[in-house]
Image (cartoon, rainbow, N blue to C red):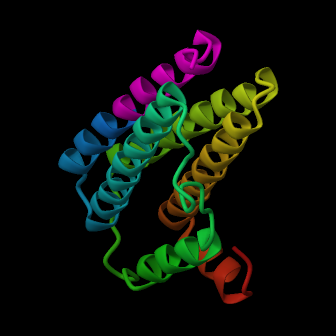
Amino acid sequence: MSVPDDKLLEPLRIALRMEAEGRNTFVEAARRASGRHARQTFEFLTAEEDRHIEKIKRFYESLLNQTPPEPSELSVHGIDDKLDQFDRQLAALKGEMQPARSDIEAFRFALSFENGAEAFYRKQIETTDNERVREFYRWLVQEEELHGRVLTSCLLFVEDPAAWYRRHDSGSS
């Protein structure tokens, strides 16, 4: 058995550092959040980053040891359900929201961070010929897309609640 090429492993090491940085950013944002909505959002994102870190570690080890990935490793089932559930939680906060400027800025920064991670993972899809690795990065892209959609929804909710409710009352997300 030969060790996988470092061209496969180094981007995963970068991904681990990126996800850890995101986790630390979200932990701090949750700690500093003035509103329950922002705190819950950043706690959700922290848990998501923890999940990504664990999956990246397991995938990295499976490549290193040349073992097959877990069958459900890359499940993206239920992404729209997750977003719908998150939006229902937002709707339940009607009347509680007095977002602080710092919360809005934290949402914007987090969205920029997630978009950067998504772009990095998309680039990795294009730069590898290994289909197993490409599939893993496609999963990460879909995860980051979900986070982007959550943060976009949060921003609309705090910046223009009337538009947020019109959008969701019409059934679109």
| Magenta span contains residue 19 | yes
Q: Quadrant of the N terminus?
A: top right
* Horizontal arrangement in the rendering, residue 122 relative to residue 158 (left or right): right
Of the pair 48 and 126, the residue shown nearer to us:
126
* Percent position of residue 149, x then y: 61, 58
How many tags in the picture? 0
Image location of residue 34, percent across then percent down:
23, 55
Front residue (pair 39, 97): 39
Residue 159 relative to residue 52: left or right: right
Residue 136 drawn above or below residue 12: below
Determine the image quadrant of residue 66.
Answer: top right
Q: Identify the residue shown where x is 66% and y is 88%.
A: 169
> Does the segment drawn in magenta span residue 6?
yes
Residue 164, given in percent of the width and then of the height, sits at: 61, 73
For image coordinates 70% across by 26% down, the residue present is 124
Q: Which quadrant: the C terminus? A: bottom right
Q: Nearer the viewer, residue 73 or 143?
A: 73
Q: Where's residue 36, x and y in %? A: 26, 66
In the rendered structure, which segment of residues is drawn in magenta?
Answer: 1-21
Closer to the camera, 105 or 21? 21
Residue at coordinates 46% horizontally, 21% vertically from top-left? 13
**Residue at the far left in the pictured view:** 31
User: Does residue 168 appear to the left or right of 111 in the view shown?
Assistant: right
**Quarter of the image where one finds residue 117:** top right
Identify whether 124 is placed above or below 103: above
93 lies left or right of 67: left
Residue lying farthest to the front in this orientation: 1
